[in-house]
Image (cartoon, rainbow, N blue to C red):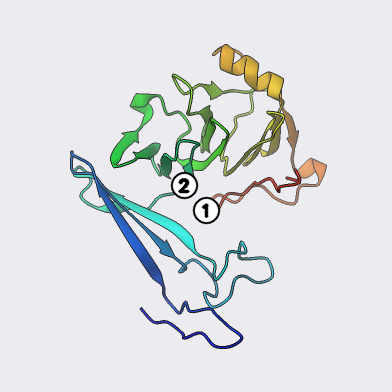
Amino acid sequence: KSFQAANAVDTRSARYPASVWPSVSVADDGRMAIAWQDDRTDQDPLWTGGLSYGEGTDPDNWQIMVATRTPALGAWTAPVSLGSDATGTVWIGYLGGRLLRVRGDKLTMLTAKDGLQVGTVKAITSRGDHLWAGGDAGLQRLDLPGMPAIRTRDGAGLDGITGIVETAQGDVWLNGLTGITRIAASEIQRALGDAAYRVAVTRFDTLDGLPAFAEQAWPLRTAMETPDGRL
């Protein structure tokens, strides 16, 4: 790797490209995962960010990246999304409706056979003990038995979800291909208690002034909440 020495006014050191601190985990059945820190997705790794890009990390725009390899595939695959829950378990989403759970040194791959219904997992987020996953085809709570899915009353799908926020009040906000969607906490609770229930939602789209729909190929989440409660 190539590094730039610090000086009196600049402590940055990353140069093109930079990927450091790899960590490898191997399951008993031969599946492998390697995680590392990388800044090659940064438009300019020598800077924290710029106008309209960079999420403000210091000293640079570092990302945690993970690649996995299974005996069946025989090749390394890159993740689409990454998240963690209150227990420290790491969850990694992939194309084709696959979700890897990394709990200590144990790797578990979840698919549709295990009840995963969101398609390609594009967003993973948690609040307290709650763990949400969203993707091409919907929204699910992963921390509950059966991983219950949320479906809407208006018939429009919760498609292309790349951003999820659960507020302190329990409302869930989604950013996806149908625009910005708000589901009230009371609706969420009814749906989690009754698999047949369809939630009422509030949607904001281009008719409300939204300039576009959620980015689908962006490696970062497309919705977040600030410490003062702004979305």
Q: Residues within 10 Å of mark 2 (few under 14, many from 20)?
A: many
Residue, disc 1? 217
Asked if residue 179 shows in the view, the reply is yes
The quarter holding residue 127 reads top right
Q: In this view, does 27 lie to the left or right of 129?
A: left
Furthest-bottom residue in this view: 8
- Mark nearest the camera among 2 and 1 is 2
Where residue 210 appears, x then y in whole percent? 76, 47
Q: Which mark is residue 48?
A: none
Q: Residue 82 carries which label?
A: 2
Between 110 and 157, the residue placed more toward the observer is 110
Q: Quadrant of the N terminus?
A: bottom left
Q: In this view, does 144 lie above or below 48?
A: above
Q: Residue drawn 71% across and 47% down? A: 227
Where residue 37 appears, x then y in whole percent? 42, 62
Q: Is residue 183 left or right of residue 12?
A: right
Amino acid type of the residue tagged 1 in the rendering = Ala
